[in-house]
């Protein structure tokens, strides 16, 4: 019988949704010829622009064109943010949003700046700190 702590240590934090299986299936369908390039390389121009200007470069090569490295772009959506979300430009900005009381959701998208391939990599909760929890952990004066 395996120990539960080891299993839990490998699992994602609560609320994180990983989209690798969907990504793998989509790439497989493309490589089998069941999807055309224009069907998988259809990123919105603003997403490609964000990838060029704010994206975090990865070591992963685009699985479609194989000409460029993928970049990661993070958007956060939730109360008191613009309807189109907020494109995160730094880890510090994400950390500030994570301290908010409002529950937010971060979407990490990989983008190829050359062919416009894009895929949602993961979603994760951000913020949602309750004032009650903050008050309980505060030290009395």
Image (cartoon, rainbow, N blue to C red):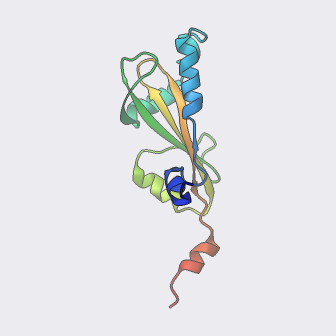
Q: Is residue 30 above or below residue 4?
A: above
Name the residue: 54% across, 26% down.
24
Residue 51, quarter of the rendered image: top left
Q: Is residue 33 visible?
A: yes
Q: In the image shown, does 12 or 58 lie closer to the viewer?
A: 12
Q: In the image shown, does 129 or 60 lie closer to the viewer?
A: 60
Question: Which quadrant, please, contains the N terminus?
Answer: bottom right
- Give percent across and percent down for residue 19: 57, 36
Q: Is residue 24 left or right of residue 95?
A: right
Q: Is residue 42 visible?
A: no
How many marks the image carries: the answer is: 0
Residue 29, quarter of the rendered image: top right
- Give percent across and percent down for residue 60: 38, 29
Q: Is residue 113 above or below residue 99?
A: above
Name the residue: 49% across, 22% down.
117
Q: Is residue 137 above or below residue 123?
A: below
- Give percent across and percent down for residue 88: 47, 45
Name the residue: 50% across, 91% down.
141
Q: Is residue 108 left or right of residue 104?
A: left
- Give percent across and percent down for residue 9: 49, 55
Check the image and name the residue furthest to the bottom.
141
Name the residue: 54% across, 50% down.
11
């Amino acid at each position: 019988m395996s120990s539960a702590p080891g299993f839990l240590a490998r699992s994602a934090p609560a609320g994180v949704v990983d989209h690798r299986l969907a990504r793998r299936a989509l790439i497989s369908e493309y490589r089998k010829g069941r999807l055309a390039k224009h069907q998988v390389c259809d990123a919105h121009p603003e997403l490609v622009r964000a990838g060029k200007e704010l994206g975090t470069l990865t070591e992963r090569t685009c699985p479609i064109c194989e000409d460029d490295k993928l970049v990661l772009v993070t958007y956060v959506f939730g109360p008191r943010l613009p309807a189109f979300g907020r494109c995160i430009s730094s880890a510090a900005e994400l950390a500030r949003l994570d301290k908010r009381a409002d529950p937010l959701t971060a979407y990490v998208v990989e983008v190829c700046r050359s062919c416009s391939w894009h895929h949602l990599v993961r979603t994760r909760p951000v913020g949602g700190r309750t004032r009650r929890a903050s008050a309980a952990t505060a030290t009395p004066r």
